[in-house]
């Protein structure tokens, strides 16, 4: 059996997708914004390491060589050192400086305070090294647009791309911490009176600025700090730069939405529309209009389709039954009523001319037809009760009822034989209901076989897939039922003994009572007469 998801599963998946789209966009936006800041931080760290190494060489002079460890800023702690194999396979110790800024966690500092007058005179050697380094800083700024300042061991600017030369930056947190040997990266609020630049401009309009400060060490002593600042790429400009990729992603999202709509249409809308069309055809009275859908996809749609098809089939059968029933009732009532009407008209017109015997014969016709109508009405009421009967929790003792019916019909001249008393057998239904079933079958045999008919009752308990069942056989030695009538015997008003008072409702009542109790009744082949086999749920006596 092909698996079909439930409707709530489909709705849950669709809602999850709809929920994840904006949440995913928010997360991706935040992560991308943070990545832009860290990218800027990484670029400035790389620039700061190179500038710090250049300043160190200028400070010491070109004749002195530095160890590889001194060519880098001092690490924050020993955990930053890693050993990796170089091209020859030898282990080499590295001191990477990872980007750590996180806009969601790190504090946002106020704008950088202006430079102040230094408290000490700058070192002559540091000043000369700064002068020689200045062309390098300007060349770097020309390409990277990064603000670069190199301060000496006292925080005085000795080389800058700005206008703070000879002034002190010691009051700034990143400088003071870097002079203590710490590698510092922080975010500051950016104030600018310039209008927001266009997306095509090299300028950036983000209101946050990244500051990186790297200490410069010589022989284990901090000789200065490289301070770099740069406005990271803002989201608008970054998205503009990758606009074609974003258009591709948007196209993919639109395609996903269209696929979701198509999936919803295939799984819900189209099957529901098909069921609506079937229901409309049923309303118009078309027979066989409601059939189970071939590919319902969803479990609930399949159940609804099956239920609608079953309901339509039941309504068609019920409508046919009511139509046929109404026709038969009309016919059954019309015959005696016509006879009564004709007899009354004859009596009204020729009452005085009739002899006493003629009047008695006509009155007898009226009485007979009236009795027939009364019997027909009572049988119709019995059939109506059987059709709407709701089984209870009652139990009927089989042996007691069969023996009582045997004696009752014997008084009417019908021989009923019970094979044995069955004191321990019981059936799950009211005693009067079980008695009505058996009595109708015996009376049916009497009507077709006459007073000399013999009826035999046999009963036993069997086990079926439905559980313990009571199997009752009612056999008679009458004329039997012809093959052409075997399929019609349970139809209301069908009878071959109408002249003997048969209404054609007895077997219909029996079948309705048996069906109401989840039982079965069938006419089985027999050598003589008729043989009915009834199965009813067994119960403890």
Image (tube, helix red, strand yellow):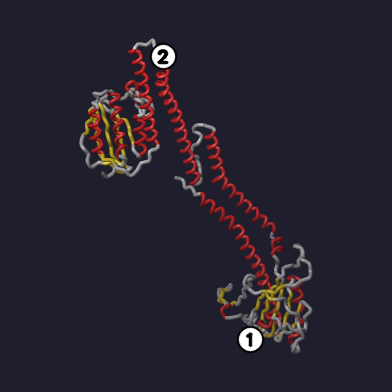
Where, by quadrant of the figure, is residue 363 drawn? top left
Toward the viewer: 157 or 396?
396
Farthest-out residue, left: 420
Residue 437: x and y in percent read 31, 34
Q: Residues within 10 Å of mark 1 (few under 14, many from 20)?
A: few
In front of the other: 389 or 138: 389
Q: Which quadrant holds the C terminus? A: top left
Q: Crowding near pointer 2: few (<14 within 10 Å), some, many (20+)?
A: some
* Direction from residue 271 to residue 514 in the image, left or right: left
Residue indicated by mark 1? 220
Relative depth, front residue between 219 and 287:
287
Between 186 and 524, the one lying in front of the other is: 524
> Which mark is nearer the camera, 1 or 2?
2
Does the rendering let one see residue 89? yes
Q: 540 above or below 417?
A: below
Spot occupied by residue 128 in the image (x, y as percentages of width and height): 76, 85
As drawn, 373 above or below 132: above
Q: Secondary structure at mark 2?
A: helix
Q: Are marks 1 and 2 in contact (CB under 8 Å)?
A: no
**Residue 3, which numbered label?**
none
Q: Compared to 223, does 90 lie above or below? A: above
| Numbered mark located on residue 346 in the image | 2
């Amino acid at each position: 059996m092909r698996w079909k998801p439930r409707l709530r599963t489909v709705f849950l998946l669709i809602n999850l997708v709809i929920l994840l789209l904006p949440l995913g966009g928010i997360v991706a936006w935040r992560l991308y914004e943070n990545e832009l800041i860290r990218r800027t931080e990484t670029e400035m760290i790389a620039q700061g390491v190179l500038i710090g190494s250049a300043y160190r060489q200028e400070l010491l002079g070109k004749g002195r060589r530095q160890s590889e460890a001194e060519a880098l800023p001092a690490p924050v702690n020993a955990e930053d050192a890693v050993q990796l194999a170089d091209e020859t396979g030898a282990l080499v110790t590295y001191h990477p400086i990872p980007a750590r800024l996180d806009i969601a966690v790190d504090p946002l500092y106020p704008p950088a305070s202006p430079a102040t007058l230094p408290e000490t005179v700058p070192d002559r050697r540091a000043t000369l090294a700064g002068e020689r380094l200045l062309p390098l800083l300007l060349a770097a700024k020309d390409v990277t647009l990064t603000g670069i300042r190199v301060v000496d061991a006292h925080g005085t600017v000795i080389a800058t791309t700005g206008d703070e030369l000879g002034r002190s930056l010691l009051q700034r947190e990143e400088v003071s911490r870097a002079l203590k040997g710490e590698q510092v990266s922080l975010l500051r609020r950016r104030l600018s009176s310039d209008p927001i630049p266009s997306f095509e401009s090299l300028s950036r309009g983000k209101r946050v600025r990244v500051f990186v400060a790297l200490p410069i060490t010589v022989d284990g002593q901090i000789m200065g700090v490289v301070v770099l600042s740069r406005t990271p790429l803002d989201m608008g400009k970054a998205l503009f730069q990758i606009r074609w990729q974003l258009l591709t992603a948007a196209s993919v999202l639109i395609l996903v939405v269209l696929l979701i709509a198509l999936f919803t249409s295939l799984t819900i809308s189209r099957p529901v529309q098909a069921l609506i069309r079937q229901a409309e055809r049923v309303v118009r009275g078309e027979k066989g209009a409601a059939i189970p859908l071939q590919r319902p996809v969803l479990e609930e749609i399949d159940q609804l389709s099956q239920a609608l098809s079953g309901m339509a089939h039941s309504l068609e059968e019920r409508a046919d039954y009511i139509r046929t029933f109404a026709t038969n009732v009309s016919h059954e009532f019309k015959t005696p009523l016509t006879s009564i009407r004709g007899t009354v008209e004859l009596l009204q017109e020729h009452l005085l001319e009739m002899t006493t015997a003629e009047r008695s014969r006509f009155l007898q016709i009226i009485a007979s037809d009236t009795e027939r109508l009364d019997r027909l009405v009572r049988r119709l009421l019995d059939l109506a009760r059987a059709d709407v009967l709701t089984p209870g929790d009652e139990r009927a003792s089989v042996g007691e009822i069969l023996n009582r019916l045997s004696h009752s019909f014997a008084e009417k001249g019908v021989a009923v034989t019970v094979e044995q008393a069955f004191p321990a057998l019981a059936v799950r239904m009211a005693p009067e209901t079980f008695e009505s079933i058996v009595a109708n079958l015996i009376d049916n045999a009497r009507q077709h076989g006459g007073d000399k008919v013999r009826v035999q009752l046999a009963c036993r308990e069997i086990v079926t897939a439905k559980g313990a069942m009571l199997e009752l056989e009612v056999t008679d030695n009458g004329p039997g039922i012809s093959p052409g009538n075997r399929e019609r015997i349970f139809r209301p008003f069908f009878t071959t003994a109408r002249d003997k008072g048969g209404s054609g409702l007895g077997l219909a009542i029996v079948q309705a009572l048996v069906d109401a109790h989840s039982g079965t009744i069938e006419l089985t082949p027999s050598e003589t007469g008729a043989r009915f086999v009834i199965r009813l749920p067994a119960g403890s006596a």
